[in-house]
C-alpha cells in the first residue's frame, strides 16, 4: 500500500495524508507575515514568537522562500521580511513548493517508472493516491495567502458539523 504524505481530512477517523512540519510552518509563517507586515518589514523573531516556531528553523525556511522569490529581506535597523508580491498573488502551493515540500500522496518517486512496492511495482491503489495528489495540488494552487488571512478558505466545518463558506468573524460567539 502506498504511504500517504500530504494533507489531513478533518472528518475521517484516520489521517489519510499528512503535511510535514516544513510545509505547515512555511505556510503559517507566510500567513503571519502577510497579516502583520502592513508595508513594513517584519522580524523573524516576531513571527517565531507569535507562531511558536524556532527562530533558527524559520531562518532556514525564509532562506528558501527568498530564493523562491516569495519574500524580500530588508537589512539593518527595522529590517526583516516583506512579501515579494501581494498576498492574493501568492498561492499556498507556491509556498510549499518553495521549501522543497513535495505535494504528493504516494511514496513513489515523481516521474519514476518504479512503484512503491518492494518489487518496484505499483500498488493496487496507486492511481487513487496519485489522483488525490493532483486534487491537493489543484486545491492548494487555488488558495492564496490573502484567502487564508481573510478567512476566505472554503469548506471549513464548524464544531457542529455545518459547512461554512462565508468568512467567520475572528471573535464570533458560538
Image (cartoon, rainbow, N blue to C red):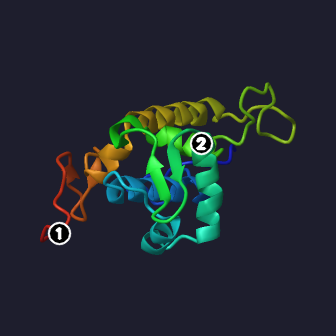
Circle 2 residue: 98
Foreground residue among 65 and 119: 65
Q: Position of residue 108 (x, y in %)?
A: 73, 37
N-terminal of the pair, mark 2 or mark 1, is 2
Foreground residue among 125 and 31: 31
Q: Secondary structure at mark 1?
A: loop
Outermost residue on the left side: it is: 173
Q: Is residue 145 left or right of residue 53?
A: left
Outermost residue on the front side: it is: 77
> Label 2: few (<14), some or many (≥20) within 10 Å?
many
Q: Is residue 103 visible?
A: no
User: In the displayed structure, would residue 157 be above or below residue 83?
Assistant: below
Which residue is rendered at x = 46% and y = 66% of the image? 47
Q: Nearer the viewer, mark 2 or mark 1?
A: 2
Q: Position of residue 1 (x, y in %)?
A: 69, 44
Which residue is rendered at x = 54% and y = 30% of the image? 131
Q: Position of residue 95 (x, y in %)?
A: 52, 44
Foreground residue among 83 and 15: 83
> Label 1: few (<14), some or many (≥20) within 10 Å?
few
Total numbered badges shown on the rendered structure: 2
Q: Is residue 60 left or right of residue 118?
A: left
Q: Position of residue 173 (x, y in %)?
A: 12, 71
User: In the displayed structure, would residue 39 be above or below residue 126?
Assistant: below
The answer to which image quadrant residue 20 occupies is bottom right
Circle 1 residue: 171
User: In the displayed structure, would residue 38 be above or below residue 139?
Assistant: below
CA distance for labels 2 and 1 = 33 Å
The answer to which image quadrant residue 105 occupies is top right
Q: Say which quadrant the C terminus sits in.
A: bottom left
Q: Secondary structure at mark 2?
A: helix
Q: Is residue 165 left or right of residue 86?
A: left
Amino acid at each position: 500500500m502506498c504511504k500517504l504524505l500530504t494533507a489531513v481530512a478533518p472528518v475521517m477517523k484516520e489521517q489519510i495524508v499528512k503535511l510535514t512540519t516544513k510545509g505547515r510552518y512555511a505556510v503559517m509563517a507566510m500567513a503571519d507575515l502577510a497579516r502583520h507586515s502592513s508595508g513594513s518589514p517584519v522580524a523573524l523573531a516576531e513571527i517565531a514568537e507569535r507562531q511558536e516556531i524556532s527562530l533558527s528553523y524559520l531562518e532556514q525556511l525564509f532562506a528558501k522562500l527568498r530564493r523562491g522569490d516569495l519574500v524580500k529581506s530588508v537589512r539593518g535597523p527595522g529590517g526583516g521580511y516583506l512579501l515579494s508580491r501581494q498576498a492574493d498573488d501568492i498561492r499556498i502551493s507556491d509556498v510549499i513548493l518553495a521549501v522543497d515540500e513535495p505535494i504528493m500522496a504516494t511514496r513513489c518517486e515523481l516521474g519514476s517508472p518504479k512503484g512503491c512496492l518492494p518489487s518496484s511495482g505499483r500498488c493496487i491503489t496507486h492511481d487513487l493516491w496519485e489522483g488525490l495528489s493532483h486534487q491537493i495540488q489543484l486545491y492548494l494552487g487555488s488558495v492564496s495567502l490573502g484567502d487564508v488571512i481573510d478567512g476566505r478558505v472554503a469548506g471549513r466545518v464548524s464544531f457542529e458539523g455545518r459547512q461554512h463558506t462565508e468568512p467567520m468573524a475572528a471573535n464570533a460567539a458560538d
